[in-house]
Amino acid sequence: MVEEASKNHHTTYFGIAKKVAHNVSTKTVKRRIEQKNLKKCVAQERVYLDEDLTQERLEWALAYRHWTREMWRRKAMWGGEVSVERGGGKRRKWVFRYPNEK
């Protein structure tokens, strides 16, 4: 059960129960996974890019494409890293993670 959750972070308790053994309840799967210190967490949200924001980001990238690594190191201020996804809905996504994983 834990191996399946570790391999496929986006699976569900029901999916694990169905794949491992048909006669195992989702509560049993949840208990076994929690015993191994594996937690179900909300996946980090990605920034939604509409057409306007996509165009703004492209223009910004093109304006600074000539910068060298040294220029970026000296002049750029960075915030937290973020991944970006175009489209997508508002549904929360859950993933399995160990406490030391992001």
Image: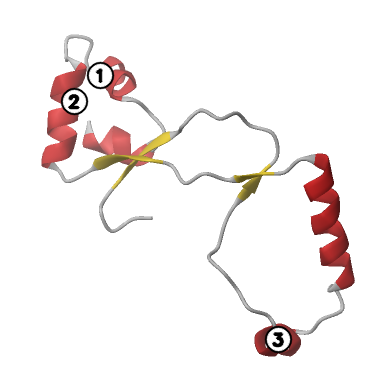
Q: Which residue is mark 2?
A: 29
Calculate the distance from the C-alpha at mark 1 to the C-alpha at mark 2. Answer: 6 Å
Q: Which residue is mark 1?
A: 17
What amino acid is labelled 3 in the image?
Answer: Lys
Relative depth, front residue between 23 and 42: 42
Categorize mark 3 by other alpha carbons within 10 Å: few (<14), some (14-19), many (20+): few
Calculate the distance from the C-alpha at mark 2 to the C-alpha at mark 3. Answer: 50 Å
Mark 1 touching mark 3, by CB under 8 A?
Answer: no
- Is 58 above or below relative to 29? below
Mark 1 touching mark 2, by CB under 8 A?
Answer: yes
Of badges 2 and 3, nearer the viewer stands: 3
- Circle 2 — which element? helix
- Circle 3 — which element? helix
Color encoding of the figure: secondary structure
Q: Position of residue 82 (x, y in %)?
A: 57, 57
- Circle 1 — which element? helix
Outermost residue toward the front?
52
Identify the mark at residue 34; answer none if there is no mark.
none
Q: Which residue is mark 3?
A: 75
Relative depth, front residue between 20 and 15: 15
Of callouts 1 and 3, the N-terminal one = 1
The residue sitting at 30% across, 18% down in the picture is 14
